Image (tube, rainbow, N blue to C red):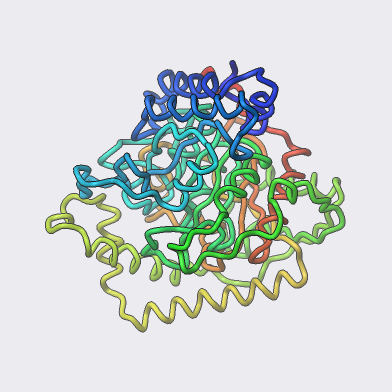
Amino acid sequence: MSTLLTASELVAAYSTGEISPVEATEAALTAIEERDGEVNAYCLVDREVALEGAKASETRWREGNPIGWLDGVPTSIKDMFLTAGWPTLRGSTCIDPDQPWDVDSPVAARLRENGLVLLGKTTTPELAWKGVTDSALTGVTRNPWDPALTAGGSSGGSAAAVAAGMGELSVGTDGGGSIRIPAAFCGIVGLKPTHGRVPLYPASPFGALSHAGPMARSVDDVALMLDVLALPDHRDPAALPPPISAYREAVRRDVRGLIAAFSPTLGFAKVDPEVAELVRSAVNGLADAGLRIEETDPGFGDPKDAFDVLWSTGAAQWLDTFPPGSEEKVDPGLRRVWEQGKTYSAADYLSANAERAALGILMGEFHTRYDVLLTPTVGIPPFEAGHEVPPGSGLSGWPEWTPFTYPFNMTQQPAISVPAGLTSDGRPVGLQIVGPRHSDDLVLAVAKLVEEIRPIRVSRLASGG
């Protein structure tokens, strides 16, 4: 069977008996065997656990009693989430794998409760600290479209696995763009929901910046997965109440006539000309489909300095709990962030948090006039793997090439990346759709319209072509 069916297509085939969860899981495991040596998306694959889950799902489908809309769908989980029975090393050589691993994070618990088949865990840079995926523990994760290129990060393993057909779904984290960056680079769909929409445990040291969300090859699949991930968990005191309606239904909302602001640069970002052209073409397509487009900027300057304070102090707080001698073992770039974070005072942190809050208020007012904001997801196409910044760019750190993503971690708004097209040399480009807080249903519906007018499938990746 094809390894590039969407989760929705798989479930439809399960219901008719055309395909079984065991067949789908074996196909995903075969794809991992054939492709992951080159792509390096997985840091752990558990064939026995996956097939056991698939057989249980097959029985439920045969008896007409599936336990969820995604029962039996092969799925991966980023190695930032506690997953009972598997170590959670977070890309770090400083975390001892030889300890009890008997707790499920809310994300892992919801996946199991809804019958999804867990294949294994996907790669992350150490502590998910940067916008590409490589670490001393697991090596370099590569882009299935072209293994010479980066998959992005920090959920690069998840994006690469989904794009290459090594499982239909994955769950990533996003503290500054970590779902949306690799989704754009790998030509898939990735949603950073409203903060608190997906419960987290343990609490992230990155605090208000931290989100978790679904990654898939279609908007419908992302919506279905959000229905699972958004279920409550008492361990997250910041979690939102359960959604009032199902995202799998809301994704089909008619959005024609809504007002969308299109900001090609946010007023301060540099954008590759080919990326700019592809994004503008996608926006023009939305206008032709019935959205009312106004080209305008939200009206804020680059909040990178405040983001750097919030990000580095969170990293420093976490790393200060690591065993003695960790300074010499962690990623050198992460060590610089650790050292930077320790230079800030409580007043510095509070000032940065105040700037974060002010940015949220500004965007709240902006969305009284515009239903959604459209931007590039990343201003550049994927670049050479194994580098934090594009070689020869003169940039010093990953936030310098991701100015479209981290501002909306600070504002805690929902933001989704959907494929906008391919560059002349075949590198994927993403369009970002940002909505007001709690409007996850709206950004999904607009994303669905983009997908309908610009269908970009990754079927050639199944064979590595």
At x 60% / y 42%, what residue is drawn? Answer: 189
At x 51% / y 28%, what residue is drawn? Answer: 164
* Number of numbered discs overlaid on the protein picture: 0
Relative height, residue 412 to residue 400 (above, below): below
In the rendered image, the quadrant that contains the N terminus is: top right
Q: Which x, y percent locates residue 213?
A: 53, 50
Q: Is residue 339 left or right of residue 48?
A: left
In the rendered image, the quadrant that contains the C terminus is: top right
Q: Which x, y percent locates residue 252?
A: 78, 46
Q: Residue pushed farthest front? A: 63
At x 26% / y 50%, what residue is drawn? Answer: 331
Front residue of 399/6: it is: 6
Q: Residue pushed farthest bottom? A: 347
Q: Is residue 171 left or right of residue 422?
A: left
Q: Is residue 370 left or right of residue 402?
A: right
User: Is residue 423 visible to the viewer in this orientation of the structure?
Assistant: no
At x 20% / y 49%, what residue is drawn? Answer: 94
Relative height, residue 79 to residue 174 (above, below): above
Front residue of 275/105: it is: 105
Q: Which x, y percent locates residue 445?
A: 74, 50
User: Is residue 406 visible to the viewer in this orientation of the structure?
Assistant: yes
